[in-house]
Each structure stands twice: as structure tokens, then as C-alpha cells.
Image: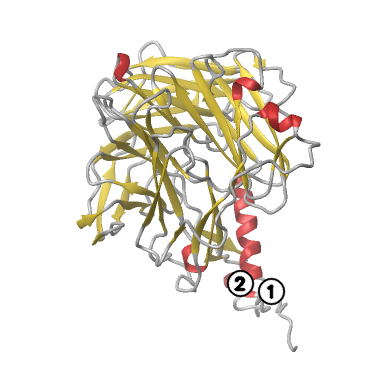
Amino acid sequence: MNRTTLSLIAAATALAAVTGFASLTAPDSTDTAVAQVPALLPVERTTQLCPAPSVSDVAETTYTSFTPAGTAGTSGGDAAGSAELRESVVTLADAADATAKKDDKKKDPAKTPAQDKAFIALKEPGKPVSGEASGADAPALIGSATGRFAPGWTTQQTTVVGVGGARGLLGTACAAPDTDFWFPGASTEAARQDYVHLTNPDDTAAVADIEVYGKDGVLKSDVGEGIPVPGKSSVPVLLSTLTSEAAPDVTVHVTTRTGRVGAVLRVADEKAGSDWLAASGDPAGRVVLPGIPADATDVRLVAFAPGEDDADLKVQLAGADGTIVPAGNETLHVKSRMTASVDLADVTKGEAGSLVLSPAQSGRATPVVAALRVVRGKGSSQEIAFIPATAPIASRATVADNRAKGTTLSLTAPGATAKVKVTASAGTGGGEQAEKTYTVKGGTTLAFTPPVPAGLKGSYALTVEPEPGGGPVHAARTLALPEDGVPMFTVQTLPDDRGTVSVPKAREDLSILGD
């Protein structure tokens, strides 16, 4: 299911519900053209879901929430509203437990959330707010923003685990609920502990299915179907409990039979640390995976074709000076509904870049999903992160929890040259907004330290806005927080924030008059 379509429908419905009527006046012959032009309006409500961050007692987690100030080109940006995140009821159950309890009417013992108090609440757009939690009891969060806080609202979850099997810097942008998710780049090997976190924002229970695809097709499972996710709860599902087959590279497909969930995958590698794997963008014939660090020591590409046709992909690296084809990995053949992978080693050769996958033959674009596993460091000082394929920024994208040191922004223009305005917000503890415009040459990746707010205290948000008339732009943010010689880092892609929606103007007045 196309998430963009669902989001637009939901946004339009919310707009109608909030205003209470649709003012649709029939035009005369002189203004027919005007009436047919859709109105660009801000969304009125947004939901976000943050997974339980860690099972480690030494984990330190920061949640940072932000809404850009104003919604350019729209009306209604000054309407009242709020943005709050509250604790969910965290249900610690793997798939086998969840399946066994389908018919159990007893309520599982769970932590009761503080429903009368928000964990994080924004005070005004343009100023980020942060909250902290420690240890394995840090909660999953369920949030909602309305009015002027809804357009572009984002929350970043950043966790530092200094020791143990879950060691690493884990980062993820809290996700919107949906009914369909793809995760290429997961694993069921013994050295990996991969959990799919399912979070239900609604009062009624959701029911989810999880399918796992290896290099030869779907992996058999008796417990991946009909997984219950109670209302206002989060359920982690360990992938290795779904199948007896150990596979180094798999693609995970999460769908819901009833309800909707937020889904994200937490990876813990006993040798290379841990991080979150966010869902790939919607299947497309051409995909971009932006933001490979310059010092990456190993890059592994995993791709999957969900349709009935095989995909033959051209593999290219967009670097600082142009686009090249990695030697020995010019193309990748992806069989229908089978996971394909290739080790690209140190493909960046000391230069930051982005991977571009396109049809090997013109006119034969088979939709695919894809992700990269990226390693920095070597031996016992390795650290991993993941980069899913992401769509270009249509209008605006934002990432929160950037630091004065250790933040790198990557902008990729796979087609024509583009100009991009980058705005740094005030800090969580103070500072003044800063902005700068960058030119990204066609076929290249521009990786740089973004502007830092003057007088910065705390962390800040970055908002990226491509200027009209340029080529498409894909973006990613790398946050590096090295610790004890380990190059800890995490990468978040920046999809469009979908802060506005086009609402067609109607020709009749449908408002209800009178009491």
C-alpha cells in the first residue's frame, strides 16, 4: 500500500473534520480555472511512534521533538494546537509468546504509563524540546500534534550504549503509523539479534503479519501471522523466533490485517554494535540511498523486488565530483520476491557518497526496495548503521537532535543541479536560528558540516528545503559520537515531512446552516 496516498487521504479528512464544513462555492464562468486549482493547506494532525529504545541497563536515551516555525505557502499556520508524546504500555513479548496468548483473556502485567502527564510537550514551533530516559525501562512513546504544531513535526530518538552486546549509538526518527513496511537488510543469523518493534497508537488492538524473505524466497514460519498488538502498546518481535533458517541477509515485510502500527527494526550485532533499521521508501524503479560516510570500511547492499518481475539494476556511486560505477559491481540482478545482496567493501574510497540504483535497461523499471549496512572502524572497534532507500524531498524535511560537533549533512542530486536552503533552529537550551543556501551539482553528493546556531546550548534541528526549479534532492544526516576508541555513529535519511496537502476546491456550498 502506498503510504503517501494514505497520508494525503488522512490529512484531507482531518482538515474537513477540524473546520467542520467544506466551503465549496460554485464559480461562474469567469473563475472556473481558479476553482480547479487545488489549495495547498497544512495538515491538521500528525501521529508519531517511538519504539522502546533498549534492553540495556546502561542505555542513555534522548528524545528531541521539533516543529519548524511557519508553513511557507499555506494558510492556517498560526492556528492553535499542541504536540505531546506520552508513554505507551510496553508489552515484552516475542512472536511465539504473542501467538500463544492470542486467546488468553488475562491482561499481561505491564508498566502503566503516566497518561495524565506528557513525556515531551512542545511549547512553540521553531524551538526544539528534549527529554531523557535511562536504562532498559525507557518507554516507547505515542505522540500526536495538532494545529500549528502538526506540519513538519518530527521527533528523534538517540540512544548511547557504551558496553555489552548492544553497544553502539542507536538513532531513529519516530515513525508515522501505517499498514505496510519493507525492511531489506535484516538477518536471522545467530550473531544478530534483530527485533521488529510494532507500536499501536490506537485504543483498539491491531493484528500484524511478518514475512521474511531470504535469497531463495520466503522463509517458512508458523508464528509470523496474526501477531496481536494491544491498543496503546508496543510489542518487540525477535526475527529468529519466526523461522529456523539462519540467513545473513533477509527482507522483512510487515503488514496489518486490522488497525495500523509504527514499525522499525532494532539490530544488535555481537561484533559490530547496534542501530535501528528504518523502513525503506515505497518500491520504485529508481532508488537513492544517501549519506554513506567517507570513512566507511564496509558497505553491504541488500535489495528486494516485491512484484512478479525480476529487476536488473545499474549500481552507481554519486560522490563529490560526479557519478561512477563501482568496479566489479556494475549491476545487480534481483529475482522476484528473493533477497539479493552484494558486498561493496570500502566503495567510497575516503569520499562521502550516495548509492543510486536504476534500471540496467531503459524502459524496464521494476520497483525495488533497498538498504545499506554501513560499517566504520575495524576489529573490536567496529560500529554499524543502516541507510534505507529514501524518496526525494518534495518540499521540506527536518531532522532533530543535531550536535555542535559530530553532525554531517549529505545532499544528493542524482539528476539536475539543485539549490537547497538549510535552516538550523535555536537549540534546546538556547541559541539563534541560522540558515545557508547550498548548490548541489547534478550527479553528485555534497557532504558538509551544517550551520550551527549562534550561542547554541543543547542540540538543534535542521530543516532542508530544495528551491523550486532544480533537480530532485535526497538527504541524510550522520551523527557521530565516538566513545572509547569506537567510532559510534548513526545515519537518518530525511524523507519529505508531508506537512501540506493539496485539497481540491469544490463547486458547491455544502456547509450546513442554522442550529
On the image, the x and y values in percent for residue 131 come to 39, 52
**Residue 427: x %, y % from top left:** 28, 57
Can you name the residue that lies furthest to the left here? 455
Quarter the C terminus occupies: bottom right
Q: Amino acid at mark 2?
A: Ala
Say which residue label 1 marks: 507
> In the image as oriented, which residue stretches furthest toward the right?
103
**Residue 383: where, in percent of width, then height?**
35, 24
Given the current orientation, which residue lies at the most extreme front position?
A: 109
Q: Quadrant of residue 211?
A: top right
Residue at horizontal 48 percent and vertical 60 percent from the top = 151
Circles 1 and 2: CB atoms closer than 8 Å = yes
From the image, tell me which residue sits under label 2: 35
* Dot 2: element: helix
Q: Residues within 10 Å of mark 1 (few under 14, many from 20)?
A: some
> Which residue is pictured at 42% across the width and 27% down the height?
166
Q: Earlier in the sequence, mark 1 or mark 2?
A: 2
SS at badge 1: loop
Residue neighbourhood size for the residue with mark 2, other residues' Cα within 10 Å, grouped as few (<14), some (14–19), many (≥20): some
- Distance, label 1 to label 2, CA atoms, is 7 Å
The residue that appears at 35% across and 38% down in the rendered structure is 412
- Image: 109 above or below 194: below
> What x and y, as percent, mark residue 288?
44, 33
In this view, the residue in front, 88 or 42, is 88
Q: Is residue 370 visible?
A: yes
